[in-house]
Image (cartoon, grey):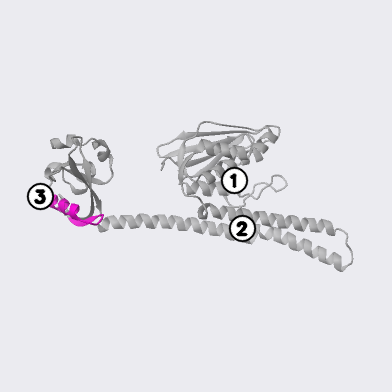
Amino acid sequence: MHSHANLITNQHFFEQYAEAILITSANRKAIYVNAAFTELTGYSIKELSAEMHGLFGKAVNQKTKYFESDLACKNETLIHVKISSSKIVFSDQSEGRVYTLRENSEEAKLKEAQTELANLNKEFKRSNEELEQFAYVASHDLQEPLRTISGYIQLIQKQIQRGNTEGINDFMGFAVEGVSRAQALISDLLQFSRVSRKGNPFAETDLSEVLNIAITHLSVKIKELEATVTFEKLPRVRGDSSQLTRLFQNLIDNAMKFRAQGRKPEVKVYVKEQEEMYLFAVADNGIGIENKFYNRIFAIFQRLHTRTEYEGTGIGLAVCKKIVERHGGEIWVESEPGVGSTFYFTIKKQLI
């Protein structure tokens, strides 16, 4: 490499850069190329031709952000590239230029289109699954309280026609209860649909603060049940703090709701660092779940117990799943009936 390259103070940064980089001195002599440049063009620093030097000179004179041109690689193939140019100051205070190359060939465009299509297909499949769930809710879950309301109103009507008011107050109470149940289902359904549509923009978020807020929201219930919630220091991630608060709140609330008889609820939250993700766990000492129900519990309004046993509509874990997926992760459960459950979920490590 040319001795001028010693003036570049951050060569390691450029070497790690994913895009092709060429650096020239003040007199436009090439003094450095990174590995990505050699991989793209086949040329090392010593093999750059005068024609290529001229090409980069043209890029400097362009008024647009990018200069587009065909570029002959060492193996004689022709690629279409976008070249951007900016000044660089060396350690001796002299100036040079940094050129960034982005391939814009048909093959690159095809790869980009294929990736985009795969992402669209994945999103389309997810949307179809949600539509199927919504259709099931409309045809089944919402119909049940409506049938209850209709049935008791008919009984009230018959009693009035007979001139008999016996039982009317009870029938009215059951009808009102059905209305309340339908309202709760609709409210939770709207809440579920808003996870993607009404979410806040992602920002750097301290999950220790998020978890503390979730615990504060549950403080009355924690005190009433004499529950304990312990956790270690959690990392900072890029996400929607409001939804992540809801995620932890739902999982901890769930752990306390399905507590084992004769045992005070104990909830532990911890994290393990992986290569690209953080793996979080919310563990409890509750009633546990049979493995045949592992997937079912994350679907909308899918309950394993009757409303008289445990309150709620069965939306909590479905909301958790949707929040985790919006943050690029996955959620699952491992459990032993009678011993307890651990809900695991992942979130990407990247920050802003």
Which dot, 3 or 2, sits closer to the camera? 3
Residues at marks 1 and 3, CA–CA distance in whole angstroms: 68 Å
- The part of the image, by quadrant, that contains residue 10 is top left
Q: Position of residue 337 (x, y in %)?
A: 62, 37
The residue where tag 3 is placed is 50
Identified by mark 2, the residue type is Val
Which dot, 1 or 3, sits closer to the camera? 3
Q: Is residue 31 left or right of residue 327?
A: left
Which dot, 1 or 2, sits closer to the camera? 2
Identified by mark 1, the residue type is Phe
Residue 57 lies in the magenta stretch: yes
Residue 329 lies in the magenta stretch: no
Count all numbered tags in the image, as a single digit: 3
Label 2 crowd bin: few (<14), some (14–19), many (20+), radius 10 Å: some
Give the residue at the far right of this rendering. 163
Residue 77 visible to an observer of this rendering: no
Magenta region, residue range: 49-70
Return the residue nearer the eye: 268 or 309.
Answer: 268
Give the secondary structure at mark 2.
helix
Q: Is residue 177 left or right of residue 160?
A: left
The residue where tag 2 is placed is 137
Label 1 crowd bin: few (<14), some (14–19), many (20+), radius 10 Å: few
Q: Which mark is residue 293?
A: 1
Identified by mark 3, the residue type is Ala
